[in-house]
Image (spheres, grey):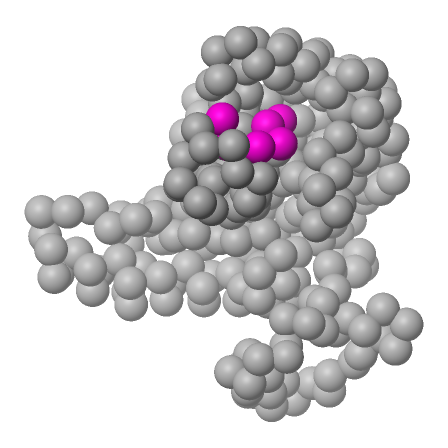
Amino acid sequence: MQPNLNLITIKDNEKLIKELLEELVLQPRMKALEWSKITHQTPNLRIGYPGQHLASLITGIRGRKTGARGDDLEDGTEVKSCSRIDQMDKCKDCNSPVARIEITCSNCGSNKINRKKDSKWLFTIKNENDLKVLTEDVKRVFLILADYPHFNQQDYETLRFQSFEIWTNSNRHKRFKEIMTNYYYQIYLVNKNKKPEETPAPKNFWPYSYQFYLCNPILTFSCIVQKASTNPEIIVDHYIKPEVDRSNLDSVMMPIKLLWRKEEKQLVKNYLNSQKLPSFIDENTRNILPLR
């Protein structure tokens, strides 16, 4: 879990990260929001390629310009991006699409809006070689997430950008391989055998889900953007520098609320028993402490 120091060539990273977010994400977003008021089209700007730029600045490692699996960064890191910002919402009364900036439905006037936050990372695995490349050849999976930290309070003016790392050759992150393997053999191939003419959906890897925390991801970057639609201010609140060995960093803690359901409690119990690990709960945060 030690990054390749020879490939860390980008310097002054934190300053460049702020500049990139401002120029490639926030300024275009503000323009898109203005045009959305006229066109009634979604202002959601896909974060895929800006996400790869961001990954290079956070890790200090340049890309290979191919966009192919395993070649997102020069050290073979696989970059996946997910944006929950400016998703298209839906009216609960007439099912019409509603833009995030709209307070009421433009079709029926209802204020009963289903605000969406269901974007996820997608992993395409169509054969055993794809599975091998993702879980063995790729040593680091770099996950970028853009979302609203105060979504439940309907605060859409505060944005958050985060990055998480999963090292596929680390024992700490071995559940990632297990999850992807189970998807390929138990979901993809089963569905493919039932309907050979169709291509099954890729693996949905949901942020903040039970499977996400089970993989023990490491948070390497986090920033908050205040007044995002008018006068953005970027505040970096967490950043692990590129050359730091990730082995001694804590994983993101699993919120205890994910374990309330009976089936999830049993899954955790089975895992702890198989690893002969005790469960630790932080009494202040009520979170499951990282499983090492």
Per the picture, the main secondary structure of the magenta-coloured stretch is loop
The structure residue drawn at horizontal position 80% and vertical position 29%, both measured from the top left corner, is 225
* Along the line of sight, the residue nearer the viewer: 268 or 153: 153
* Nearer the observer, 113 or 170: 113
Residue under the point 80% across and 78% down:
281
Quarter of the image where one finds residue 242: top right
Closer-to-camera residue (183/113): 113
In the drawing, does residue 180 fall left or right of residue 128? right
Can residue 102 be seen by looking at this rendering? yes
Q: Quadrant of residue 217?
A: bottom right
Identify the residue at image location x=62%, y=16%. Answer: 33
Residue that sits furthest to the right in the current view: 284
Q: Residue at x 72, y 73 (%)?
A: 256
Q: In the rendered view, tell whether residue 100 sits above or below residue 10.
A: below
Residue 265 belongs to the span the image colors magenta? no
- Quarter that holds the C terminus: bottom right
Identify whether 2 is placed above or below 223. Answer: below
Q: Nearer the viewer, residue 125 or 194?
A: 194
Identify whether 143 is placed above or below 74: below
Q: Over which residues does the magenta segment extend?
A: 101-106
- Return the x and y of residue 158 as percentages of the image width and height: 77, 34
State the image coordinates of residue 232 (x, y, percent, origin top left).
81, 20
Q: Position of residue 102 (x, y in %)?
A: 59, 28
The answer to whether residue 121 shows anywhere in this view is no
x and y percent of residue 113 in the render? 55, 42
On the rendered structure, is 125 left or right of 15? left
The mark total stands at 0
154 on left or right of 117: right
